[in-house]
Image (cartoon, rainbow, N blue to C red):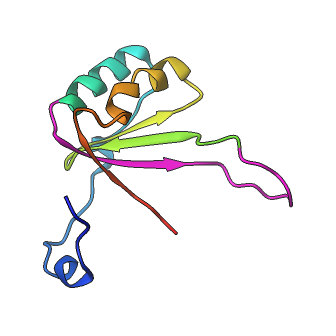
Amino acid sequence: MERLTNEQVQFLPMYDGLSLDNIIVVTQKSDAISAIEELKKHSVLGFDTESKPCFKKGEISDGPHLIQLSTKAKAYLFPTKFFDNFAAIEGILSGQDHELYLDLKV
């Protein structure tokens, strides 16, 4: 799939976003398993990461600290401090079965 042009984006329908009920923070292994099973049902996923900010000159981030995978209707937030849950999404992150859309903020 190719990136949309600015003109094409203008004609897309408005996206209302997700309600808080549809944003899941995955902290338990059982939640990670459920999230992965749901994500595998979709051929297209959104992907984003977040890192804690660095406030001192020369400070190096040890992030990312959060990985977000989402469908059109639900977002799953995987804090990387729960490594077992984070490691469980490796197959999805490899993109072998899914097309990932990256949120690249420059």
At 40% from the left edge and 58% from the top edge, which residue is drawn?
103
Name the magenta segment's main secondary structure.
loop
In the image, residue 86 above or below residue 44: above
Residue 53 painted magenta:
yes
> Which residue is farthest right?
57
Where residue 10 sits, quadrant-wise, is: bottom left
Tell me residue 101's x, y (percent): 31, 53
Quadrant containing the N terminus in the rendered view: bottom left
> Which residue is farthest bottom?
7
At 26% from the left edge and 82% from the top edge, which residue is drawn?
6
Tell me residue 38's x, y (percent): 21, 29
Q: In the picture provided, is 11 more to the left or to the right than 32?
A: left
In the image, residue 8 above or below residue 41: below
At 21% from the left edge and 66% from the top edge, which residue is drawn?
15
Tell me residue 78's x, y (percent): 45, 33
In the image, residue 38 above or below residue 17: above
At 13% from the left edge and 80% from the top edge, which residue is drawn?
11
Q: In the picture provided, is 81 more to the left or to the right than 1?
A: right
Tell me residue 75's x, y (percent): 32, 43
Q: In the picture provided, is 35 more to the left or to the right than 82?
A: left
Query: How many labels, in total?
Result: 0
In this view of the protein, which residue sits in the foreground, 17 or 40? 40
- Residue extent of the magenta highlight: 41-61
Residue 56 painted magenta:
yes
Where residue 98 sits, quadrant-wise, is: top left
Where residue 17 sits, quadrant-wise, is: bottom left
